[in-house]
Image: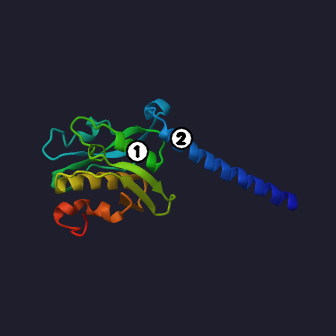
Amino acid sequence: MKRKSHSIFWLLIVIVLSAVLLSKLEDWQESRPVKPEVILNTTATIILVAYDGEAIDREEGVAMVGYENEDFAVERSEIGCGDTLIPIRIPVVSTRLKSILNALAEYESLQGLHNPVNEKGVSVKHVSGRDGEKIIVELLGKPELGGMCDAERLKSQIEETVKLYQENAQIHLNGSSEEYECMRNVFGRCTNMQ
């Protein structure tokens, strides 16, 4: 019996060390200066924005950008200011949420679509938590928003991309959930924020 418990103990040690090593390997791959499509042939779904009144075929928009609805039941949806959220697939280093959000922050959008995360200079600092638990998405940046439509586009893009992978998430900007929520201060809210 002692030998069996001793073997189980070492097996658990090997499993834990393997998990730590795999996590560190993914972090290392994400930090490499090589483009994701060179490392792996992995893709993930992100959300881009089609501005109201711009030239995009609303009926054919999804097919036009090459989105294939094989992994998610995601459909285009409208947000404030008459804009439309469009799901597309892009190359990523791994399918961890942090990697997907980093790829979103660096992605140059297709013609007719916009990537407010990239355009407004928002980056991902950290994603903490585990599957099934509430996670915290830590963003960095001082986005210069041109009005209520800009705030709605940016927040909707971030929130809907995160929801594709994690339903229970809280988003912070520069270490604060209030600063993230107060991006809408163009509406006259959050008057105590600077």
Q: Cβ–Cβ below 8 Å for labels 1 and 2?
A: no
| Residue type highlighted by circle 1 | Asn
Circle 2: residue type = Trp
Q: In which quadrant of the rendered image does the C terminus lie?
A: bottom left
Look at 52% across and 58% down and name the residue there: 130
Say whether disc 1 or disc 2 marks the residue closer to the N-terminus: 2
Between the residue at mark 1 and the residue at mark 2, the CA separation in whole angstroms equals 13 Å
How many tags in the picture? 2
Query: Looking at the image, which residue sits at the far front?
Result: 194
Residue 163: which numbered mark, if any? none
How dense is the environment of label 1, judged by Cα within 10 Å: few (below 14), some, or many (20 and up)? many
Report the disc number at residue 28: 2
Q: Is residue 4 above or below residue 48?
A: below
Instruction: Give coordinates of residue 186: x percent, y percent.
Output: 18, 60
Residue at (53% x, 41% y) in the render: 28
Q: Secondary structure at mark 2?
A: helix
* Residue occupying the far bottom of the picture: 192
Query: Can see residue 78?
Result: no
Between residues 47 and 21, which one lies in front from this camera angle?
Answer: 21
Q: Residue at x 36, y 44 (%)?
A: 104
Asked if one can make out residue 170 in the rendered structure from this viewpoint, the answer is yes
Find residue 87 and report its image quarter: top left
- The circle drawn on residue 102 is 1
Front position in the image: 173 or 110: 173
Foreground pick, 73 / 21: 21
Q: Circle 2: is it few (<14), some (14-19), or many (20+) Cα within 10 Å?
A: few
Secondary structure, mark 1, is helix
Q: Position of residue 103 (x, y in %)?
A: 39, 42
Left or right: where does residue 134 sit relative to residue 108?
Answer: right
Judge by depth and name the residue closer to the eye, 133 or 35: 35
Q: Quadrant of residue 170?
A: bottom left
Report x, y in % for residue 11.
Answer: 74, 53
